[in-house]
Image: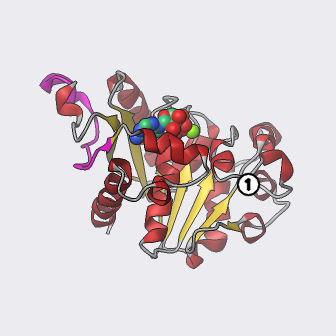
């Protein structure tokens, strides 16, 4: 059965887009049929994929508005097993245009349902906010991953997020589960133990994944060249961490 996984945090710069791109690519390299969705009107993931949002006609916006089917907006990427749904700035109009439409938070779920049988995994990138598209992403997901950056104070952000998660579980998607907190941009293999006190660790609402993603310049180099880090330098620390993380994730959500 297809598993839909969203990458959620209201904090800018914790690595949501990078994590979505790299998990999806790593799963595809493991020959898992994967659909990656840019669920953020800022379209960073679409740019990451080397697509200029202004130059494409069919995006997630068109699917939201019922002007295109999911199949029409999905594009095959240069990576076998990896399909992508781009977004564009017009997605900003969606919430306004759908303002009084009942059930608008479930439209992304319906879009995914149209094609989910073609895929084993669906990965959704979401905006740095707790607004409409983040709620749509969680409403469409079986699992969410909560990235946190090792270098910033994330504790409060994680507890605000917990409130929204509970609201989504209560009102929109009782099946939503949290796979865990993924610590990103860590030095070496250090996890939260190094910079959070025991008391602070206890306040983190969801358990941390064992694998952490190291801070690695290769990640930025890869994103500038529009590639996942594994295709830039498969031996880099970050590429290896993404392979380890994908194995841990698949076990967790099996
Ligand atoms: N593991 C990492 N090592 C080094 N830089 C990283 C790593 N993960 C993300 N980055 C960089 O951090 C910045 C923010 O990441 P991004 O994925 O855009 O965050 P978000 O989507 O949460 O706003 C980007 O420049 C990205 O290349
Ligand atoms: Mg982003």
Q: Nearer the viewer, residue 132 or 171?
A: 132
Residue 167, percent from left and from top: 46, 39
Look at the image and say whether residue 29 sits in the magenta stretch.
Answer: no
**Does residue 109 appear left or right of residue 149 in this picture?**
right
Residue under pointer 1: 60
- The reply to whether residue 139 is visible in this rendering is no
Residue depicted at 21% across the width and 36% down the height: 190
**Residue 36 in the image, given as x and y percentages of width and height:** 58, 60
Q: Is residue 224 above or below residue 78?
A: above
Report x, y in % for residue 198. 13, 26
Query: What residue do we see at 77% from left, 51% from top?
Result: 61
Query: Would residue 207 be found to the left or right of residue 41 on screen?
Result: left
Tell me where the magenta segment starts and ends, as one range.
196-213
Using the rendered view, name the quadrant where residue 82 is placed.
bottom right
| Residue 204 inside the magenta-drawn segment | yes
Mark 1 packing: few (<14 Cα in 10 Å), some, or many (20+)?
many
């Amino acid at each position: 059965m297809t598993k839909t996984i969203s990458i959620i945090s209201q904090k800018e710069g914790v690595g949501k887009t990078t994590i979505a791109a790299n998990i999806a690519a790593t799963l595809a390299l493991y020959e898992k049929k994967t659909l990656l969705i840019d669920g953020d009107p800022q379209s960073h993931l679409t740019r990451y994929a080397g697509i200029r949002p202004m130059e494409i006609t069919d995006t997630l916006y068109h699917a939201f508005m019922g002007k295109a089917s999911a199949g029409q907006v999905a594009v095959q990427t240069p990576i076998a097993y990896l399909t992508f749904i781009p977004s564009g700035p017009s997605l900003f109009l969606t919430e306004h245009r759908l303002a009084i439409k009942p059930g608008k938070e479930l439209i992304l779920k319906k879009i995914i349902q149209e094609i989910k049988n073609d895929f084993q995994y669906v990965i959704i990138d979401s905006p740095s906010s707790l607004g409409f598209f983040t709620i749509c992403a969680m409403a469409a997901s079986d699992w969410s991953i909560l990235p946190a950056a090792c270098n910033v104070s994330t504790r409060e952000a994680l507890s605000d997020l917990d409130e929204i998660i509970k609201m989504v579980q209560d009102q929109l998607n009782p099946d939503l589960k949290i796979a865990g907190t993924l610590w990103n941009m860590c030095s070496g293999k250090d996890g939260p133990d190094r910079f959070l006190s025991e008391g602070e660790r206890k306040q983190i609402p969801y358990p941390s994944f064992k694998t952490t993603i190291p801070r690695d310049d290769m990640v930025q180099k890869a994103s500038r060249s529009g590639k996942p880090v594994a295709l830039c330098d498969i031996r880099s620390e970050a590429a290896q961490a993404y392979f380890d993380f994908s194995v841990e994730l698949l076990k967790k959500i099996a």
